[in-house]
Image: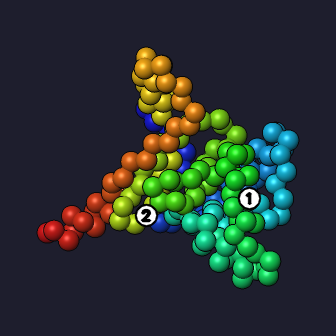
């Protein structure tokens, strides 16, 4: 059974606590790996966690520009590169956007469920799926360098809303 690492956020959850927990986990992950979470990197991570929706780099730049006069695209992209390399965020390729990693201390390959209506993303860790891909790749003589699986569909809330419209 898949482990949901970052699920579709329930409407009434403590988002402030959610962000705080993510930042504490990020600090621990960086300390454990000997990486430095600078104030700018931390702020970019915080901006990503401010929403349970994927965030594009230029949205982050726009938010940072309101706080820092020297905010520029290379600054944001370097921070995002660090955050990805540290396992603190994931890039959703089909959306060209980023989401925070729910469990940065647990090395894992993630799969993503993307609601095409509301834009919410759920991060899954399904080892059996990754093992199946690895086995198939090995049979074909292929060495997997990076695995990203993105599945589009409708979340539970959007399915309910859609059913209500069709009644």
- The residue singled out by tag 2 in the image is 119
The image quadrant of residue 21 is bottom right
Q: Residue at x 43, y 63 (%)?
A: 119
| Image position of 58 with respect to 34: above or below | below
Q: Residues within 10 Å of mark 2 (few under 14, many from 20)?
A: some
Q: Nearer the viewer, mark 2 or mark 1?
A: 1
Q: Residue at x 85, y 51 (%)?
A: 36
Which element is circle 1 on? helix
Residue 55 as seen in the image, left or right of residue 156 = right
Is residue 8 visible to us here? no
Quadrant containing the C terminus is bottom left
Pinpoint residue 5: horizontal percent, then vertical percent.
55, 45
Residue 106 as seen in the image, left or right of residue 118 = right
Residue farthest to the front, as pictured = 141
Q: Residue at x 53, y 30 (%)?
A: 144
Distance CA(mark 2)–CA(mark 1)? 25 Å
Q: Residues within 10 Å of mark 1 (few under 14, many from 20)?
A: few
Is residue 84 visible to us here? yes
| Image position of 26 with respect to 33: above or below | below
The image quadrant of residue 161 is bottom left
Which element is circle 2 on? loop
Q: Residue at x 74, y 59 (%)?
A: 79
The image quadrant of residue 46 is bottom right
Out of 66 and 157, give the one closest to the viewer.
Answer: 66
Mark number, residue 24: none
Pinpoint residue 95: horizontal percent, then vertical percent.
47, 60
Pinpoint residue 85: horizontal percent, then vertical percent.
70, 46
Mark number, residue 78: 1
Pinpoint residue 32: horizontal percent, then vertical percent.
82, 39
């Amino acid at each position: 059974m898949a482990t949901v690492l970052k699920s579709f956020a329930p409407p009434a959850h403590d988002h402030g606590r959610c962000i705080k927990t993510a930042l504490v986990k990020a600090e621990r992950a960086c300390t454990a790996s000997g990486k430095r979470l600078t104030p700018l990197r931390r702020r970019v991570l915080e901006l990503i966690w401010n929403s349970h929706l994927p965030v594009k780099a230029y949205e982050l730049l726009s938010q940072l520009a309101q706080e820092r006069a020297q905010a520029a695209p290379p600054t944001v992209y370097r921070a995002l590169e660090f955050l990805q390399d540290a396992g603190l965020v994931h890039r959703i390729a089909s959306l060209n956007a980023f989401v925070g990693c729910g469990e940065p201390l647990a090395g894992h390959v993630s799969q993503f469920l993307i609601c095409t209506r509301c834009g919410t993303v759920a991060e899954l860790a399904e080892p059996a799926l990754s093992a199946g891909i690895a086995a198939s790749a090995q049979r074909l003589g292929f060495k997997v360098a990076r695995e990203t699986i993105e599945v589009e569909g409708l979340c539970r809330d959007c399915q309910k809303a859609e059913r209500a419209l069709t009644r």
